[in-house]
Structures are given as structure tokens and as C-alpha cells.
Image: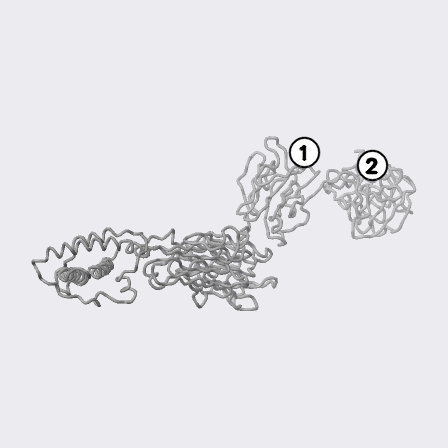
């Protein structure tokens, strides 16, 4: 208790005693007055001893009276000292007399004064105790929230939670008041309201802060004390904010909550703490204010667009225009740091240096597209925020959100950036959307072959040659895989294996297709992509096949190689290209499938064996009952046809090179006479069949009826005009017509630049001096 106040109360007690003792003798009264004066003087001197210059005469019993005051008791009559306090009177208003120096009566007077004083104190103690209870009362803070869909909640006090937690409801209004306060002063408060910002005026002592009936959220709050309350207490408060949860404790007018996030306040706690006392909890991050990020794009045929901010779209969407450069900057920063960025530019790749704070990244007036971008924060900004960004890329559209320096866009495709969005998010909080597939680069395809005698060869990639060329070695198995892949999906493949045919299951991602240790050749292969890889890429491949060499490029699961020919694969090349891009080379004839048996093609019926069209099928079909013989005079070629039932003579059986002449007629004729040997004009011929008139099929000319007297150089002239009109043939061919084509066989002679459906045979030359036909079966 304050000593000065105690002294005042003692003075009041002594004055009361003075009136009680009015019936005593003058001497006693004087002595009492002297005692009272002494006590009063003592109090004055105790307050200002330096001013009075008098000796302090407070008795030890007075000090004891001060110590025995209880903190609680019944209320008694109001003392004179209390009345003085109410009326503003002070001790200086009391007429204090100089003490009388009477040594004879000093002892008696003191004894009488003490006795009366004890009596008086006993009567007045209850009154002093009641006044001490009012002096030590503790103030309380009461507060009340109006909550979305709930309305006004009940008041809570002293750190309890007002509002809601976990119900995702906004606080819309707040009231705060003090109660049982020991000191003068108020509590004042104001709110940051959705769309309105900070209230311009402070509410106080139970008035409403915020709005009612407008559905506007509170986003932050400031609370402070005034007057003596502010001198003796700190007011602490914290809020439960959307996305953040409980923030740190703010105090004495500081901001608590968020600004520029559009996050609602959901709950609040308020506590009074003695001035300078310990905070009720962590005081870090009581308030978050999000800075804004502004950005601007230079676009093909448009130039610099207006700035947008905080997630707005810069650039274009659906207009197929390239972004060529970009600028970014921060505003409303509460924390130190910058925003930095760099671009991946057509033909140039990644910029070597990072740009910052509104500097240009990219190019202008060069018509170079941006293909990707990286953005990051520095300093305190990087510690408190993540920067998220995504791009609209050619062919892909909107990609996923990248953050904090990651790449967004594409590389290796030649695709333009068309649009950009940038957002600042509190460190560690959720991204604005999906973060999948923010950046795409052209993956690599690796492959490895197992080769006859060599075993596993080294891996090659992206169009390299796997296997061997010119070494006549079979591929026996293959493994294929993707690398640098940031798009979902696989690469799958299967092989056509000697004696086994196509594998029933597809292998993928480096698994073995084919066989090892069995000496079985691969004959063909199929390769395909799955998932998003198939959506954004084509896979091309070609093989080096026995007998054919390099075939054309196949793609996306088509067959490459041969089937039914028993030809080995010797090498392979594989390339990934962006969807719809040009093939790496010719796509003509990537696969040869062997045909076996009869096939109708171009109006004819052909016979195939192991994929090869047969040009002599006499042994396959045997001797026919009838034939059609056509002679292409212009090309010196004979073709024999067999009949295909009602379809007529459409089966090419065999072709012969011949030597007609200028006298050879054209038209349709029928054979008649046949001669084993027959005299010709100035020569003799074997196996003669008359076509018409003096025009015959016959062997090469001889000088005698002797097959070793063939005229020099006539054999080597087959396939050209050399006769006077007859059709000269090799001995074996003239004999076949003689033996197999009955009299009456139709012969058509015509002119055409196309030799015939089987082409014209080419025969090996013989020495000029040789006088016999190497095909003569009688030699």
C-alpha cells in the first residue's frame, strides 16, 4: 500500500479522536491537541521532510497500525480522510499548531494519547479494510463475434476463443469491452473488412467493428488500450485465419490477420497482461500482407500488352501468337527481396543471366519465340513466399504450375509460349492448381541389340544405328527405353522371331524382346508409345533387312522388316519426334510381307513363293490343256498365259526373250504346223511351230541340220530385232512351245513399251565363236 495514503488515513483517525476527547480537562485537551498536532506534523514531515525541516515524531505504534491493516472487512462510516479525498482537500488545509514544549506533562500526555489512539484504531479498522479491497481489483476483457450463419455469439472473456475453429465460417463483426478496471481508460479496435480495407474510425467499449448483414468477412484486426489502462497493461490478441490457422500474438494496436489474401478471420483470443509482462504465446507472424506481382508480355503482332497482376493472364490464349519477352515486378512489399526471372528463347536457349524488378527478359523485333521461363524470389521474400507460375504452350495448352525457379514450358519441341500466369503464395501453402507436367523437354530413346557372334552391343540413342550393317549378322534380341522423360507413358515393342512369329505380349521400358542363346533371327519389329507420350510424340523406326538393306521409316506400332521371307534383321534406327512432325526420312516400303500362293494383282493372277512373285510357274501348274501366247514385237518379248476358268487367260506362266524382225506381222493368229527341223530362208531351224503363213516360232538359225552349226553371234542378239519376220527363241524355249502348245493355240502379236506382266528375261552372253545353243537339251 502507498505510504502517503496510509498517512492520510491516520490523520483522519486522529482528528476523530480529538472530537471524542472534548469532555476532558483543558490540560488533557491541550495535551491531546499537542499529540494530534504532533501526529499531523509527523505526517507532513514524512511526506516532505526536506521542506518542513522538523523532526519526524511518528510513534512506533503508528507504524504497527499500518502493518495490521487487513485486505478485506466490513464497510464503516466514512472517515474524514475519505471525505478529504472526495472533496479534494489535502493535509495542507489542516491548521497545524507548533508543538508545546512542556517537559513536565510530556510523559502523561503521551500515555493518554496512546490509550485514546488504541481505542480509536480498534473502531476504525473495519473501514480501512473495506477501502483496501477496492484498490487491488483486476480488470477483465470481454468480447463477442458475429459469425457467418450463426449471428452474434455469447460473450467470452480473458483469452477464450470467440468465433469458430474448423467450421470455415467468417467473422463479420466484433465487439470488445473492459470490466472491473482499476484504472481509467478504454479499449479501442478496428477491423480490415473485405472490399473496404481498414476502417477509418476506431470503435471502443463494446461498439461494433465490421459490418452487419452484408456478408463481408473480417480479414484482420487492431486492438489498443488508452489512458491509465495503456500505462499499466498490454493487450495481446491473436486470430485464427483461413489457410493459416492460429497466427502469432499481436499487441497494443499491431495488426493481426491477413491483407491482400482474401482470407477470412474465423476466431479470436484476447488477453490483458501487466505492462511489460510475458506474452501469452509465440508472437511471430501475427500478420501477413501479401505483396502483388505485376507482369507484362511482348506478343507477336501486338507488342507490349498492359500489365496484369496476381494470377491474371498475360499474353494470349487461342490466338496462336508467340510471346517474345516479359517483365515482372513486385509491389506492396513488407519484406526485403526481389523477383528474378529468365527465359528459354528460340535458337538461343536459356538466358545466361537472370533479370529482376521490371527488366526485360527475351527479345523484341527479332521474331524469336519464348519457349520456357524460370521465376524465383530472393531475400526475405523467398523465406516467406513461394512464387508459382504456369504457361500456355503451343500444342500442350495450359501446363502445370511450377515454382521457385523451376522450368515452365517446353524445350526441344520448337513450341511457342502463348500465355503466362504468376501468383505469390505463403511459404509452404498449397499451389494454385495442379503442379503436374509444368515443363516438357524432348525425351531421348535408348536401345541396345544382341547380335550374332557379338552378343550385346553398346546402347545407342535417338537415331543411332543399333546392330550391324554389311556384316551379314542377325539381330537376335533388342531392349528399348526412354530417358529424360517428364511426360507420363511408356515405350512398348515386340519382335517377329524366326520360327515363332510375332511375340504375343509387348515388352516395355528396357525389357528384352527376342531370344538369346537360341540363334534365332529377328525378322521384323513393332514399336509404340502409350499414355501422354503417345499424345505428344510419334515414334519412328526403320530396319536394315537381309536382301533389302534399309527399308522405309515405320511409326507408332506399324511393322518394320519382313515377314514370311526368312530374312534377318541386321540393324535398327529409332527416333522420337513431336506429334505430327515430319518423318526422319522416306516412309516408302517399311515392311515386306512374304506372299505365298496365288494373288490377284492388276488384272492378273500371280503366284508367290516366300514373298517373291514367281516368273516361271510351269512346274507349279503343270501342263495346261491350252495356252495363250502374246508377242510384244516392240520389246522382243514372248509371254505365255494359262487360263483361270471363266476369268480367261490371266495367269502369266513364263516369259521368253526373242528376236522378231521388221517383217513380223501384228494381230491375232492360231498355230498350225510343227517341224522338228525345218528349212528357213538361207538357214535351218529346230522345233518350229507355224504362227501364220511363213512366220514361225523356231530356234536360232543353223547353217546345216546340225545343232553344232549355229550361226555366230545370233544367240547374243536375243531380245532385239534380228529375223526377217519369224520369232527366234532359245532352243529350250522353242522346244517347250513345240511340245506343250497344241495346234490352234492363239498367238497375239502387238507393240508396247511395257514388256509384259513378268518382264523380259535377260540371258547371259556366250562367246562369239560358240556355235551351239547352251540351252539345247540334246547337247
Label 2 belongs to which residue?
Answer: 621
Give the SS element for disc 2: helix
The correct choice, above or below, for 472 with respect to 93 in the image is: above
Query: In terms of secondary structure, where does tag 1 sit?
Result: loop
Q: Position of residue 712 (x, y in %)?
A: 77, 43
Q: CA distance from mark 1 to mark 2?
A: 31 Å
How far across and how far down the image is residue 147, in percent?
52, 57
Of 434 and 147, the residue lying toward us: 147
Left or right relative to 563: residue 148: left
Vertical side of 17 occupied by 616: above or below: above
Dot 1 or dot 2, earlier in sequence: 1
Q: Does 241 sit above or below residue 471? A: below
Residue 671 locus on image (x, y percent): 90, 43
Dot 2 alpha-carbon crowd within 10 angstroms: few under 14, some 14 to 19, many 20 or more: few
Q: How many marks?
A: 2
Q: Residue 602, can we see it?
A: yes
Residue count near mark 1 (Cα–Cα under 10 Å), binned few <14, some 14–19, many ≥20: few
Left or right of 669, for residue 511: left
Residue visible at 68% across and 49% down in the picture:
588
Task: Give the foreground label among 1 and 2.
Answer: 1
Name the residue tied to disc 1: 500
Furthest-top residue in this view: 518
- The part of the image, by quadrant, that contains residue 106 is bottom left
Q: How far across and how far down the image is residue 365, in percent? A: 52, 68
In this picture, residue 161 sits left or right of residue 760: left
Instruction: Compare residues 260 and 499 and report the one nearer the observer.
Output: 260
Q: Quadrant of the N terminus?
A: bottom left
Q: Is residue 406 left or right of residue 71?
A: right
Residue located 83% across and 40% down the image: 734
Identify the residue shown where x is 80% and y is 48%: 602
Q: Quadrant of the C terminus?
A: top right
- Mark 1 in CB contact with mark 2 (< 8 angstroms): no
Amino acid at each position: 500500500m502507498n505510504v502517503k495514503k496510509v498517512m492520510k488515513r491516520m490523520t483522519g483517525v486522529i482528528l476523530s479522536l480529538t472530537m471524542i476527547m472534548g469532555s476532558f480537562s483543558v490540560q488533557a485537551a491541550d495535551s491531546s491537541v499537542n499529540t494530534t498536532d504532533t501526529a499531523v506534523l509527523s505526517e507532513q514531515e514524512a511526506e516532505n521532510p526536506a521542506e518542513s525541516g522538523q523532526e519526524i515524531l511518528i510513534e512506533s505504534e503508528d507504524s504497527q497500525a499500518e502493518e495490521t491493516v487487513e485486505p478485506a472487512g466490513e464497510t464503516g462510516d466514512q472517515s474524514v480522510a475519505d471525505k478529504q479525498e472526495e472533496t479534494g482537500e489535502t493535509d495542507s488545509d489542516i491548521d497545524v499548531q507548533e508543538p508545546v514544549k512542556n517537559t513536565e506533562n510530556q510523559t502523561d500526555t503521551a500515555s493518554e494519547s496512546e490509550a485514546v489512539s488504541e481505542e480509536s484504531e480498534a473502531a476504525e479498522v473495519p473501514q480501512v479494510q473495506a477501502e483496501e479491497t477496492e484498490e487491488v481489483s483486476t480488470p477483465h476483457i470481454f468480447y463477442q463475434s458475429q459469425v457467418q450463419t450463426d449471428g452474434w455469439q455469447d460473450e467470452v472473456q480473458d483469452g477464450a476463443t470467440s468465433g469458430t475453429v474448423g467450421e470455415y465460417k467468417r467473422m463479420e463483426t466484433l465487439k470488445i469491452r473492459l470490466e472491473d478496471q482499476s484504472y481509467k481508460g478504454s479499449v479501442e479496435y478496428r477491423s480490415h473488412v473485405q472490399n473496404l480495407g481498414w476502417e477509418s474510425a476506431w470503435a471502443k467499449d463494446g461498439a461494433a467493428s465490421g459490418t452487419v448483414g452484408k456478408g463481408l468477412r473480417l480479414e484482420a484486426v487492431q486492438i489498443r488500450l488508452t489512458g491509465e489502462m495503456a500505462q499499466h497493461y498490454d493487450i495481446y490478441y491473436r486470430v485464427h485465419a483461413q489457410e493459416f490457422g492460429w497466427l502469432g500474438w499481436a499487441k497494443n494496436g499491431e495488426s493481426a490477420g491477413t491483407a491482400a489474401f482474401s482470407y477470412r478471420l474465423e476466431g479470436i483470443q484476447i488477453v490483458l497482461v501487466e505492462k511489460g509482462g510475458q506474452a501469452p504465446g509465440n508472437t511471430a507472424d501475427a500478420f501477413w500482407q501479401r505483396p502483388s506481382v505485376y507482369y507484362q508480355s511482348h506478343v507477336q503482332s501486338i507488342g507490349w500488352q498492359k500489365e496484369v497482376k496476381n494470377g491474371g493472364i498475360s499474353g494470349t490464349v487461342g490466338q496462336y501468337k508467340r510471346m517474345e519477352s516479359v517483365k515482372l515486378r513486385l509491389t506492396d512489399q513488407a519484406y526485403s527481396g526481389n523477383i528474378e526471372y529468365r527465359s528459354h528463347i528460340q535458337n538461343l536457349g536459356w538466358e545466361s543471366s537472370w533479370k529482376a524488378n521490371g527488366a526485360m527478359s527475351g527479345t523484341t523485333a527479332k521474331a524469336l519465340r519464348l519457349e520456357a521461363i524460370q521465376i524465383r524470389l530472393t531475400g526475405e521474400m523467398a523465406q516467406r513466399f513461394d512464387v508459382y507460375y504456369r504457361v500456355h504452350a503451343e500444342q500442350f495448352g495450359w501446363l502445370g504450375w511450377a515454382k521457385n525457379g523451376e522450368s515452365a514450358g517446353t524445350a526441344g519441341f520448337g513450341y511457342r509460349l502463348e500465355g503466362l500466369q504468376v501468383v505469390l503464395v505463403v511459404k509452404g501453402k498449397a499451389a494454385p492448381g495442379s503442379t503436374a507436367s509444368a515443363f516438357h523437354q524432348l525425351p531421348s530413346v535408348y536401345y541396345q541389340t544382341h547380335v550374332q557372334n557379338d552378343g550385346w552391343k553398346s546402347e545407342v540413342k535417338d537415331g543411332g544405328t543399333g546392330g550391324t550393317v554389311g556384316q551379314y549378322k542377325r539381330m537376335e534380341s533388342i531392349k528399348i527405353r526412354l530417358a529424360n522423360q517428364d511426360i507420363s507413358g511408356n515405350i512398348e515393342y515386340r519382335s517377329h522371331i524366326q520360327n515363332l512369329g510375332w511375340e504375343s505380349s509387348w515388352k516395355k521400358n528396357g525389357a528384352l524382346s527376342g531370344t538369346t542363346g537360341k540363334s534365332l533371327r529377328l525378322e521384323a519389329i513393332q514399336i509404340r508409345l502409350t499414355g501422354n507420350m503417345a499424345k505428344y510424340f510419334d515414334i519412328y523406326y526403320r530396319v536394315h533387312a537381309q536382301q533389302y538393306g534399309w527399308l522405309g521409316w515405320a511409326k507408332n506400332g506399324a511393322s518394320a522388316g519382313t515377314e514370311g521371307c526368312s530374312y534377318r534383321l541386321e540393324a535398327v534406327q529409332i527416333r522420337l519426334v513431336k506429334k505430327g512432325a515430319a518423318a526422319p526420312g522416306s516412309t516408302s516400303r517399311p515392311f515386306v510381307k512374304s506372299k505365298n500362293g496365288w494373288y490377284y494383282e492388276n488384272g492378273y493372277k500371280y503366284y508367290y513363293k516366300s514373298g517373291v512373285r514367281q516368273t516361271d510357274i510351269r512346274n507349279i501348274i503343270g501342263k495346261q490343256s491350252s495356252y495363250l501366247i502374246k508377242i510384244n514385237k516392240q520389246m522382243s518379248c514372248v509371254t505365255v498365259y494359262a487360263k483361270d476358268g471363266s476369268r480367261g487367260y490371266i495367269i502369266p506362266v513364263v516369259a521368253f526373250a526373242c528376236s522378231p524382225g521388221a517383217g513380223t506381222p501384228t494381230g491375232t493368229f492360231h498355230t498350225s504346223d510343227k517341224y522338228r527341223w525345218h528349212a528357213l530362208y538361207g538357214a535351218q531351224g529346230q522345233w518350229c511351230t507355224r504362227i501364220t503363213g511363213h512366220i514361225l516360232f523356231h530356234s536360232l538359225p543353223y547353217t546345216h541340220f546340225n545343232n553344232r552349226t549355229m550361226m555366230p553371234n545370233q544367240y547374243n542378239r536375243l531380245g532385239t530385232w534380228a529375223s526377217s519376220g519369224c520369232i527366234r527363241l532359245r532352243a529350250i524355249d522353242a522346244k517347250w512351245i513345240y511340245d506343250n502348245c497344241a495346234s490352234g493355240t492363239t498367238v497375239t502379236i502387238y507393240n508396247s513399251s511395257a514388256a509384259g506382266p513378268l518382264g523380259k528375261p535377260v540371258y547371259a552372253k556366250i562367246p562369239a565363236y560358240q556355235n551351239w545353243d547352251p540351252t539345247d537339251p540334246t547337247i
